[in-house]
Image (cartoon, rainbow, N blue to C red):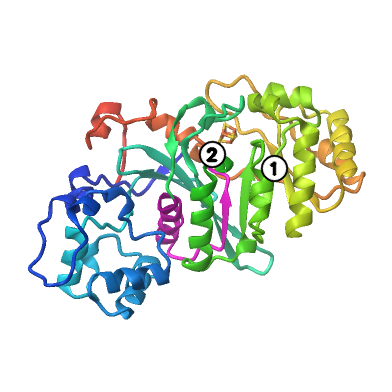
Amino acid sequence: MALLQHVSFVPLARAMRSRSLTLASSTVAVPSLEKASQVDSRVLLGMSEKELQQLALDFGQQSYRGKQLHHLLYKRKVKEIQDFSHLPLAFRNDLQAAGWRVGRSAVYKAVTASDGTVKLLIKLEDNRLVETVGIPVEDDKGAVRLTACVSSQVGCPLRCSFCATGMGGFSRNLKSYEIVEQVLAIEELFKKRVTNVVFMGMGEPMLNMKEVLGAHRCLNKDVQIGQRMMTISTVGVPNTIKKLASHKLQSTLALSLHAPNQKVREQIVPSAKSYPLDAIMKDCRDYFLETSRRVSFEYTLLAGVNDAVEHAIELADLIQEWGPGYHVNLIPFNPIEGSEYRRPYKKAVLAFSAALESRKITVSVRQTRGLDASAACGQLRNEFQKSPLLPDSDDVQSQLGIAVAC
Ligand code: SF4
């Protein structure tokens, strides 16, 4: 039974407050009204220390104010400009008057599973909801790793047949700062640093590569999460893996394969029609050669569809044909409402895994975390947002008949 923990509703009017403030009585040069009206680009979160220093200079402040801004955003995680108590009031007022805002959103709902996994629904400024998951894992030495699984889009247009996010439709790409804030929200909730980030939440990261790369940079340089601690996943979008490889990130690429051949793959992943398996495998090999970072193949096991030992043998042959540096991560299907797929029996999972290992393929079986917390990607969002856009109201609770506990 899911435990509902943190729920907050923040009026949209508050998120928009900065637009209506008047200019404080200050003598510094303030950007023109025309520029000030482009409020969407005036978000502090996601900016580097250098950019923040330049911003401070632009507002007639000394550059060390930029460093303070950086500290307030990424270390102290302050959400409102008026709460930047280290900064002069006039500077804060000027920032707000020019349309700047921090770019943090409210946590709309949090559900905690019995194993400690927490799934958050974050309510964006335009009322859309995105999921992010915090997964604490204790290693052999007793140290706790905290992984944030972040979304890159609101919904997803690719509609993989087993995926709750795909079923929920697509609204829009997320901005870099909307990805970064998911990690900060997890850190706040757990009161500890996130150690690993996986871009495996809602959406296809390669369809939003610019913003994903922006978030990756910020998480690495500003939030200080090592590149090697991050994984970018894709189900395969033509011409994007090569492009990603050219950035030479020291992060793992996780390719959602889900099938050992083109025919089965097309049944499960409709978008596979436009990206033949051989082309994907070649691009994955090139990613490995370019970055020296291993490629991990994600394989969702669907009972009676792709979980036979013959499929494992075919998968091993495919992987061996394309060379070293590969790993297979098996994911027993998490049942979702409205799907006919079934979860495979443990026996089938073990047989599949053994068949790969006996052919010298390194393999791990993903532990199902938070099954009682609507664990499948997109599942929680779908419960609360049947259509991609919520009504323009904060009274979502009563409109959707949601029972919540604060
Ligand atoms: S599995 Fe990934 S790519 Fe496929 S529909 Fe779901 S979110 Fe999109």
Residue 67 image offset from top left, x and y in percent:
36, 76
| Residue 252 shows in the view | no
Asked if residue 199 lies in the magenta stretch, the reply is yes
Check contact, mark 1 vs mark 2: CB within 8 A.
no
Q: Is residue 235 or residue 335 the one in the foreground? A: 235
Label 2 Cα crowd, 10 Å radius (few <14 / some 14-19 / many 20+): many
Residue range highlighted in magenta: 176-203
Between disc 1 and disc 2, the foreground one is 1
Secondary structure, mark 1, is strand
Corner quadrant of residue 344: top right
* C-alpha distance separating marks 1 and 2: 20 Å
Q: Which residue is mark 2?
A: 375
State whether residue 156 appears in this view: yes
- Mark 1 nearby-residue class (10 Å; few <14, some 14–19, many ≥20): many
Secondary structure beneath dot 2 equals loop
Q: Quadrant of residue 55?
A: bottom left
Which residue is depicted at the point 43% across and 66% down?
A: 48
Q: Is residue 113 left or right of residue 334?
A: left
Quadrant of ligand 1 in image: top right
Locate residue 256, reporting x and y percent: 68, 39
Left or right: where 234 falls relative to 277: left
Look at 24% across and 46% down and name the residue there: 10
Which residue in the structure is indicated by mark 1?
A: 255
Amino acid type indicated by mark 2:
Ala
- On screen, residue 139 versus residue 62, left or right, reads right
Is residue 241 a member of the stretch shown in magenta?
no
Q: Amino acid at mark 1?
A: Leu
Query: In front here: 354 or 65?
Result: 65
- Earlier in the chain: of badge 1 and badge 2, it is 1
x and y, in percent, of residue 170 in the image = 46, 30
Residue plotted at (84% across, 30% down): 311
Q: How many marks?
A: 2
